Amino acid sequence: MQFHYHNPTHILFGQGQIANINRIITPEQKVLVLYGGGSIKRNGVYDQVVAALQGYQCLEFGGVEPNPTKETLDKAVALVKAENIDFILAVGGGSVIDGAKYIAAAACYDGDGWDIVTGQHKIFAAIPLGAILTLPATGSESNSGSVITKAETQDKLSFMSPYVQPVFAVMDPDTMKTLPEWQLKNGIVDAWVHICEQYLTWPQGTMVQDGYAESLLKNLLVLGNDFADHDTNEWRSNLMYTANQALNGLIGSGVAHDWATHAIGHELTALYGVNHARSLAIIQPSLLRNQVDFKRAKLAQMGRNVFGLEASDNLAEQTIDAIEAFYNSLGVASILTSEDRQGQAKDDAVTALMTQLEKHGLNAMGENQAITPEESRKILMAALS
């Protein structure tokens, strides 16, 4: 167990914390306020931002998609360059924050910003950015990762760099009050799979990481089972902070990671527009069943310590069933239907998805590099109806 861990993001948690952003953003900085479809102008968040930055020189850029596209973000990059923006303030969920990271890095590069996503350009500088989180799920508000889609080619890829780590993250649970129930449920699933990608590998004797991961999973299990209480400050606060801790680098320090569920799930989103959390719920149970022999010990550990299952010879399989049942209890379907594929035949859909995986070089995935194209095809065949 050897690792370096440093998370410099300043967390401002609790009601009314948006008012404190002017303690971090200085009046000399020229600010771009980045947001999505405009819900922040209907739920009061925008007004709080305007009040906090009164007297500042600010520009706005809206319209960042739920799966942010290079095509939209490049327009913001051009604006940042033309207006000499000093600070980017992302107001929204993980997609807006991911988009801000791309903009921050691409604005300091003379070439095509997609080079950053594909790894052809190494980031050496980025415009500083902060986040006001309105949808808890991805943990992007305090990590260095970003996922961007190139609509032209239907590519959905990720990049990481310490240069795009947010300077601060405001986490006010009141911003969640107007979210539809399906988005809250998706947040639970998204955070759950983030934890699993860092936990469901093999036993490594990492008591702190395992124990903390299991505590976070139990939090999400309780929040899901108590979803009827979601319109309370306690419920909202616990989801917001649990989702943050699921992917801020802490539980993943010094342990093996998987991330194959995300890699395959991204292709469902890129090709069929399946929302991110549901893409994970579709792929993960099939992937776990495919890889059960590699993951048996940790699945059994999860079954005992998270779900409270009794010891048995098939405890790992029972744990996978329990995970899938949890998703379904939230109304998040764990199968890609013909309707999702706009009527495309199952075999044709699997072939299209396999073509994308091959295109992106995803030929040996998972913590053991055991998910070959042959295994990916089996996973997809089981995950599609």
Image (tube, rainbow, N blue to C red):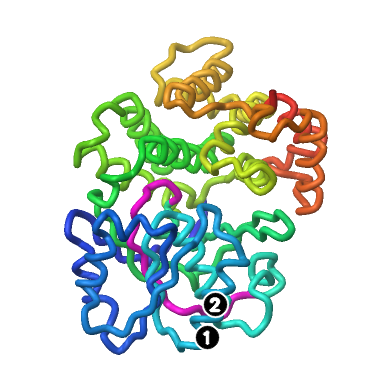
The secondary structure type at the circle numbered 2 is helix
Instruction: Judge whether residue 129 is colored magenta.
Output: yes
Q: Circle 1 sits in a helix, a strand or a loop, which is it?
A: helix
Dots 1, 2 in contact, CB < 8 A: yes
Q: Dot 1: within a 10 Å radius of its alpha carbon, few (fewer than 14), some, or many (20 or more) residues?
A: some
| Residue 69 rendering spot, x and y as whole percentages | 59, 61
Q: Residues within 10 Å of mark 2 (few under 14, many from 20)?
A: many
Q: Residue at x 34, y 53 (%)?
A: 134
What's the residue type where badge 2 is placed?
Answer: Val
Q: Is residue 361 magenta?
A: no
Q: What secondary structure is the stretch in magenta mostly built from?
A: loop
Q: Amino acid at mark 1?
A: Lys
From this view, report whether residue 319 is shown above or below residue 62.
above
Q: Position of residue 299 (x, y in %)?
A: 54, 26
Q: How many marks?
A: 2
Question: What segment carries the magenta color?
Answer: 122-138
Where is residue 82 shown, x and y percent of the image? 51, 88
Q: In the image, what residue occupies the spot 70% across and 55% down?
A: 155
Q: Is residue 301 visible?
A: no
Of residue 171 and residue 250, the one placed in the foreground of this image is 171
User: In the image, 37: left or right of 171?
Assistant: right
Spatial separation of the CA atoms under disc 1 and disc 2: 6 Å
Q: Quadrant of residue 129?
A: bottom left
Q: Quadrant of residue 186?
A: top left
Residue receiving disc 1: 81
Point out residue 115 in the picture as x, y percentages from the top left corner.
69, 72
Q: Toward the viewer: 383 or 261?
A: 383
Give the quadrant of residue 269. Answer: top right
Q: Nearer the viewer, residue 259 or 302?
A: 259
User: In this rendering, does residue 347 appear at all?
Assistant: yes
Say which residue label 2 marks: 77
